[in-house]
Image (tube, rainbow, N blue to C red):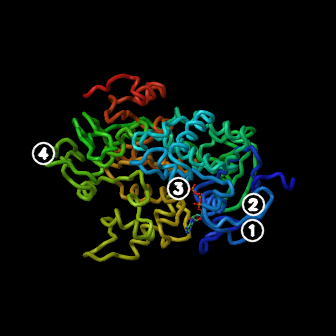
Amino acid sequence: MSGAALLRLQGVSKSYGSVHANRAIDLDVSHQSIHAVLGENGAGKSTLMKLIYGVERPDVGKIEWQGREVRPTSSAEARRLGIGMVFQHFSLFETLTVAENISLLVPGTKAALAARVRDLGATFELEVDPNAHVHSLSVGERQRVEILRCLLLDPKLIILDEPTSVLPPQSVQRLFGTLRLLRDRGVSILFISHKLEEIRALCDTATILQAGRVTGRVDPRQASSRDLATLMIGREMPPPPLHAKAKPGPKVLEVAGLDHATDDPFGVSLSGISLDVRAGEIVGIAGISGNGQKELAEILSGEVALLSAQRDVIRMMDRPVGHLGAAARRRLGFAFVPEERMGRGAVPEMPLTDNALLTAHDRGLVRRGLVRRQHKAAFAQACVEEFDVRTPSVQAEAGALSGGNLQKFIIGREIMLEPKLLFVAQPTWGVDIGAATAIRRRLVALRDSGAAILMISEEIEELFEICDRLYVLHKGRLSPSLRVQGTTVEQVGEWMTGAAGEPAHA
Ligand SMILES: Nc1ncnc2c1ncn2[C@@H]1O[C@H](COP(=O)(O)OP(=O)(O)OP(=O)(O)O)[C@@H](O)[C@H]1O
């Protein structure tokens, strides 16, 4: 077999303090292969990719590239070798054009780059106007720019970190078409995803990581999603949430005719938004990101407060709250999980204990202005245990947790506040399939205990699994309320793309 692999890792290990993020990893990526790396949150996938892309260096072990040992010490060096990477969070400047953004990394005149962008775009179904400003592009188009930027450096391997989590469903197949074309033209792909169906549809090999070690290698086309999930989590999947019929109580959240013009030149203005959520029900907001989700979340959370005259436009727990800020709304029994976990949901430089304090200070963690250290640690510890947050200790900095584990911590912290109204944005984004099921079960249990839950999600399956009712957000307007029972995925899809017509304003 030797010499056959494009990339070969032998006995590669990487630790962060006492955490063995990667242990004695052996990995072969073949030429012309789409190779999945899957594993639970914290299994070590991102660390492994950072080692390959030169962002981190292994403690021990050997990396061979095209049969020769290499030690990339920076991403620039990895790119020179022919290794590209597309991150989940794009690194493009909104005010620059596509060609200008590309010219920051790729040598050549703008005119020459624009011509190559058109050329590669036509070959790989990555069409995008090189003169368009990035702010005017959809998420799918921005991702195409990122892939094009990699391709212009003529890579032999492209690493994609959860590329479909940012895409609307209709763009996923198009991305897969591009990746297959790339493979056929000789580029190998390392593909990280939590979506097992996608891995089965796209990849020819899958390496499974568990707690930093390789625990399996399979041909995903020959395995069922259930097989892959079991291999990944090392036990049978937890059952999906039992969803008994909702017993809606009084209205806990009411928004009546919210209009909001955004100041952000790239934002979306909201128009005529009316919705309600009752105690004991989960209401979802479906839609493709960038249709006003961010603006609606800022207003509902109180990060952006309305004018006093508009206090009645938003009512929580039967009180006008439009003019109140986030802290005042929280005091009424409101809790909130924002989409951005770093910076908004948690402060990366602070330990989990202090991150618990951020929203749970009213739960007896502070007395007479003084922080009660033991109570703070006990709260964080309970959250870590109940929500299966994998971390060496509650003293670990939030920024050192893997993305999915931090998400579990933030959701756990807010659920532990026992809110009357919980508002969550993308609750299982980046969370592995076992933990996602666990989070959904907890949301249903919170609903059954009488709380009202409003959830923004791009995952239609998730919305159909746990919501009682849905609204769809499109271009800053909301569809009428749709009962999940009796509504089809296709109908929701029509509202998502605007094909269902002008939303009614109730
Ligand atoms: N900079 C760091 N400092 C300390 N620990 C870290 C650091 N980066 C990662 N870790 C730890 O290494 C382990 C592996 O993390 P990694 O991000 O590679 O997992 P992952 O499989 O990509 O997870 P996810 O699916 O949640 O993104 C985790 O326990 C994480 O807490």
What number is the disc on residue 404? 3
Mark before the other along the chain sequence, 3 or 1: 1
Q: Is residue 347 above or below residue 473?
A: below
Q: Amino acid at mark 1?
A: Gly
Left or right relative to 59: residue 174: left
Mark 2: give few (<14), some (14-19) or many (20+) Cα within 10 Å: many
User: CB atoms at circles 2 and 3 under 8 Å apart?
Assistant: no
- According to the picture, the residue beneath numbered tag 1 turns out to be 61
The residue lying furthest to the left in this view is 309
How far apart are the two marked residues, 4 and 3, measured between alpha carbons?
40 Å
What number is the disc on residue 469? none
Q: Amino acid at mark 2?
A: Leu
Looking at the image, can residue 292 be seen? yes
Task: State the count of labels.
Answer: 4
Looking at the image, can residue 471 be seen? no
How far apart are the two marked residues, 2 and 3, measured between alpha carbons?
25 Å
Mark 3: give few (<14), some (14-19) or many (20+) Cα within 10 Å: many
Instruction: Give whichever of 371, 166 is nearer the camera.
Output: 166
For the point 48% across and 65% down, the residue is: 399
What number is the disc on residue 9? 2
Q: How far from the left and from the top, in percent, is residue 232?
A: 67, 51
- According to the picture, the residue beneath numbered tag 4 turns out to be 309
Mark before the other along the chain sequence, 4 or 3: 4
- Does the beta carbon of the residue at mark 3 sit less than 8 Å from ligand 1? yes
How far apart are the two marked residues, 4 and 2, measured between alpha carbons?
63 Å
Mark before the other along the chain sequence, 2 or 3: 2
Instruction: Give whichever of 487, 132 is nearer the camera.
Output: 132
**Mark 2: secondary structure:** strand
For the point 44% across and 69% down, the residue is: 349
On the image, which quarter does residue 335 sit in?
Answer: bottom left
Q: How far from the left and from the top, in percent, is residue 17?
A: 59, 75
Q: Amino acid at mark 3?
A: Gly
